[in-house]
Image (cartoon, helix red, strand yellow):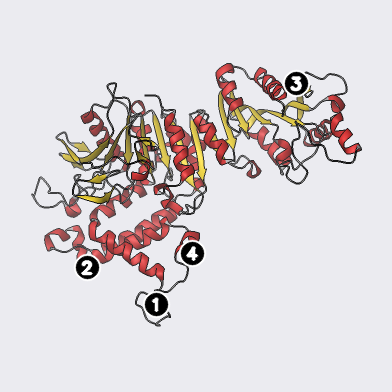
Amino acid sequence: MSVALERADFDLIASWVQPGERVLDLGCGDGSLLKRLIEERGAKGYGVELEDAEVLTAIGNGINVIQGNLEQGLAGFDDQTFNHVVLSRTLQTVRHTERILGEMLRVGREAVVSFPNFAYWKNRMAVMAGRMPVSEDLPYEWFDTPNLRFFTLLDFEALCAKMQLVIRERQVLDEAGRLVTEEPNFLGSLAVYRLGR
Amino acid sequence: MSAGVGTVSAQVAHFDQPLQLKGGGLLPAFDLVYETYGTLNAAKSNAILVCHALSGHHHVAGCTPDNPANVGWWDNIVGPGRPLDTDRFFIVGVNNLGGCHGSTGPASASPASGKPWGADFPVVTVEDWVASQARLADHLGIDAWAAVMGGSLGGMQALQWTLSFPERIRHALVIAAAPKLSAENIAFNDVARQAILTDPDFHGGHFYEHGVRPLRGLRLARMLGHITYLSDDQMAEKFGRRLRVGAGSYGFDVEFEIESYLRYQGDKFAGVFDANTYLRMTKALDYFDPALDFDDNLARALARAKAKFLVVAFTTDWRFSPERSREIVHALVHNGQDVAYAEIDSAHGHDSFLMDEPHYHAVVDSYLKRVKL
């Protein structure tokens, strides 16, 4: 993930959070997004993270991090506890896709989901040339990638329709973090959605 | 690892004001024995209270003047440069009321009779301990602890501190604990108590005046308890089915290594611990249930806490499993309170909280480094 794209992803998410709102960041890593939401947006933030090293760093960053495995859902979190539940660039690594989306909208009023678009034109070019795409945004080889699900904007929106999730807003970014308005499923590297019920 | 805190002498604080106990009893006066490590700063804002578990005491770190081999039970986490850094914090270890290491307890002389309290020593609760520890804080001039930390039953005390004195604790480190015991936990405790209560040398708790001690009961209680502190995997790895001698003798003498280990642990413990204290410590565990007065709603029970929390659990701990710690975490999250939770991959079962496990210690260190003084 390029720095510019990561910043643009976080910028969008931050712009949707109002002061005092409660945010749950799933796969929060070292807590850098939450730290920003807390410091810049005055949010009350919690994160869920599985990896020991990330949990340790997040604790050092003063983040309310809760170690846990998203594959086991969000058991224990009460219904409608959060204003926003964020899954930033993580959905493609989750096996139980429908369950986690359902859980996000159980514990939160809004789900914020961002993911890499596998139909981005450079990825299409790679496949046309006969190889799986490897790039700054998809830095893994097929045999060591943590990504389990390979999907596009159109795929994701079809799933939302099937699950009867309402797409409240969609923003699409290119590799430089610029907003894409034309042909998003072709020109967009990263998609960011706000979902509701 | 750097050198620890060195030689430490215990101190005694005497309290004249009666202490009303939750169970209805009244202690007219009492002593608390304690140790301290590090230096209390001028603002008195760097104090950490370490609460002990069932068999612990005030000797948390360093060694005692009489015996360099008598190292404190949590020495691996307390000292210069260690997670509870004595270069930065002032650490207090205390022996709880009802204990058998110097604080007023069943073996102490009752003011009414001059003889040991024995069975007449009241049943004390976690709430009572916290109330008595607050007296110690007053004695030391500490308005508010930077943190209160404990594992197991000690973690329950850290949690209770946030409820009994929300203004007097800024951080609670609740390690390998639970918001209340399960029926299975209570069952284990009662078998342990029955072992003591049915020992002919127990004499209804007044064994002191008979010049005997219920060693058999205490030994059994400890053997049972010890099984529940370990993990199945760890026992398999450490002992397996190994025999002490070549082949089975088809008798009932000690044969398997695990038998030898448990008997040794039981004997060692029975030699130094007080049976009446053991009964009371297990009762304090059984009774702890802060949600009881809130229709079993833990979130409502914890709502008055103002401290920030670090909750830690261990994957192989089946006595106080991670699920129980998560109950505390989720109640706090429900309330919008500050909490971090780490689930440590450790092979040592419930006893993991005492172990020098690098990631666990790093988590505590990382959390405490953020505590403002």
In the image, which is nearer the foreground, mark 4 or mark 2? 4
> Seen in the image, is A16 located left or right of residue B137?
right
Give whichever of B216, B355 is nearer the camera. Answer: B355
Q: Is residue B153 above or below residue B369?
A: below
Q: Is residue A189 above or below residue B235?
A: above
Q: Report, in whole angstroms, how far the alpha carbon at label 2 lies from the one at label 3.
A: 79 Å
Asked if badge 2 and badge 3 are on a common chain, one would say no
Give whichever of A52, B106 is nearer the camera. Answer: A52
The answer to whether marks 2 and 3 mark residues whose Cβ atoms lie closer than 8 Å is no
| Quadrant holding the N terminus of chain A | top right
| Residue wearing tag 3 | A177
| Residue wearing tag 4 | B236
> Seen in the image, is B340 located left or right of residue A130?
left
| Residue wearing tag 1 | B245
Tell me what residue is drawn at x 43 percent, y 45 percent.
B176
Residue B119 location, quadrant: bottom left
Q: Report, in whole angstroms, how far the alpha carbon at label 1 lies from the one at label 3.
A: 71 Å
Residue B149 location, quadrant: top left
| Residue wearing tag 2 | B200
In the image, which is nearer the foreground, mark 2 or mark 3? 3
Secondary structure under the numbered disc 1 in the rendered image:
loop
Q: Disc 4 is attached to a residue of which chain?
A: B
Q: Disc 3 is attached to a residue of which chain?
A: A
Secondary structure under the numbered disc 2 in the rendered image:
helix
Q: Disc 2 is attached to a residue of which chain?
A: B
The answer to whether marks 4 and 2 mark residues whose Cβ atoms lie closer than 8 Å is no
Disc 1 residue type?
Val
